[in-house]
Image: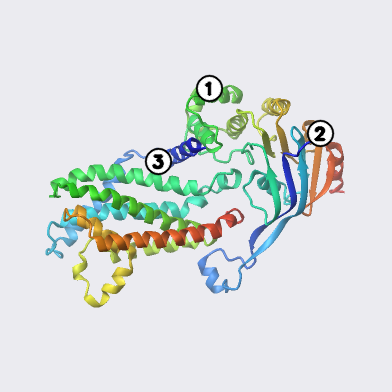
Amino acid sequence: MKTKNTYLLYFLVYKNLQLKYKHSLLGFVWSFLHPLLYLLIFNFVFSKAFSNIENYPLFVLSGLIFWIYFSASANQLCQTFIRNSHLIKSLNVKKMFYALSEQGAELFNFLIGLLAFAILMFFLGMKITWNLFYIFPIIILFTFFTFCFGVILGSLNVFFRDIGILWNTLNPALFYLTPIAYSIEIVPKKFMFFFKLNPLYHFYYIMRNVLYQGQPPEIRYTLYCLAICAITFVLALFIYRKTRNGFISNL
Amino acid sequence: MKEPVIELKDVTVSYLHNKRGIYSVKDFILKGGLFSPFEHKTVLHNINLSIFKGESVGVMGRNGEGKSTLLRTIAGIIVPDKGTCRVSIEISPLLALGAGIELELTGIENIKIFMALSGNYQKATINSLIEKVAAFSELSLEQLKMPAKMYSTGMLSRLAFSSVTVVQPELLLIDEVLSVGDQGFQAKCRHRINEIQKAGATVLFVSHSPEQVMEICERGICLENGTVYCDGTSEEAATAYSKLFN
């Protein structure tokens, strides 16, 4: 049974990756070009404005790759049940597999990209320390959060098809509300509370601790991230359990 | 008496139906969705059905009378609201043919994915399975290496039918699939179903053609208004079915 599920997941991930890149000339190169292009734009537009940020390119790049991972995963997961509706209707396969495979494909993509960008970040002046290895548990936490968030979107999207549209609208807003292109220091104290309501803020804090400052993640923020993961997980589980039996009547 | 392999007791299945046509958050707000936008539309009412090992049962009924829903319930895809559905044998996943064929991928990739989805994927046997599918579907290896979008409709159904029936199932669920392909392939499909039956499989066969049901099945069921309207030999069910239209 265990191996069956492994094969199933493997082939679904393989399928997602194939579908994404099969007919594009540049294939995987796209996953490097996207952040690279944004890096150039932000560097060009903002580096003067945020000249107080030391090593701005590294700062932006470390933020961008995680953002692209997050937003791509959420976009895919949002549509996953709808896209696989014909399978859901005719095969008795746990629906969670379709979501898992979507996340798996994005994670694979992200890790390949990370490998290439690690080299670039090294040239941009990233400190090489053992602390860099802290990024792996952070990636696991972040992936878990992203997955739960995406499952919530995907489950609701089956019933209300404009959840997907709503998400596409909110996506850029969330991008600018998260300190990716700017440092949180420019935000006035009185708004800080609202910025901290954004779950991504906390992930960005510990992620920058490691990639940008070359330090271990701060314990307090790590605990926040764990708590966010737990809350999102419970929420996702509740919504998914509540809606999954209704999928078939709405697909 | 033999123990039934499929046993449905008082099974009621309903779909969540959106009574005010609320399919988006916009509608939800504008049409006051907070006050229970969903209602249950019952498709199957208190179905009692026992099917024994090795039986072939034809399921007939008018459009929208719950034939596919019955098959999906037995396959475990739909959870009944009331009653119990107990299936004690392994099910082949075929419901609607061609589900899951990804047009961008090649035939071989599709076969592999299908085998993984149906739980039949094993590294050791996959190549021989692919050869068997190729032989039965009469698709050449060259064709199987092409993306499925370049296939004709007939080729697609050949690929799908072959992938589903390549492994001998314990329970074969067929949902109106024998109208596909050319005459030669249709005959081949019927022949393969006969083989599967002879090997001891239980077969559930949804069809609109009384002739096909009489040919393939001994037993027949006719559904009407979400209940079992007639349960007897396939001839009886076929007669009952034809009467519905007079």
What SS does tag 3 mark? Answer: helix
Q: What residue would you read off at disc 2?
A: B218
Q: Amino acid at mark 3?
A: Leu
Indicate whether B159 appears above or below A55. Answer: above
Depth check, mark 1 against mark 3: the one in front is: 1
Q: What residue would you read off at disc 3?
A: A17
Q: Is residue A54 left or right of residue B162?
A: left
B1 or B99: nearer the eye? Answer: B1
Q: Looking at the picture, do discs 1 and 3 lie on one chain?
A: no
What SS does tag 2 mark? Answer: loop
Residue A48: give x, y in percent of width and height.
Answer: 13, 63
Which image quarter is the N terminus of chain B in? top right
Query: Which picture quadrant has residue B196?
Result: top right
Q: Amino acid at mark 2?
A: Glu
- Look at the image and tell me whether residue B51 can be seen: yes
Q: Residue at x 60, y 28 (%)?
A: B166
Q: What residue would you read off at disc 1?
A: B128
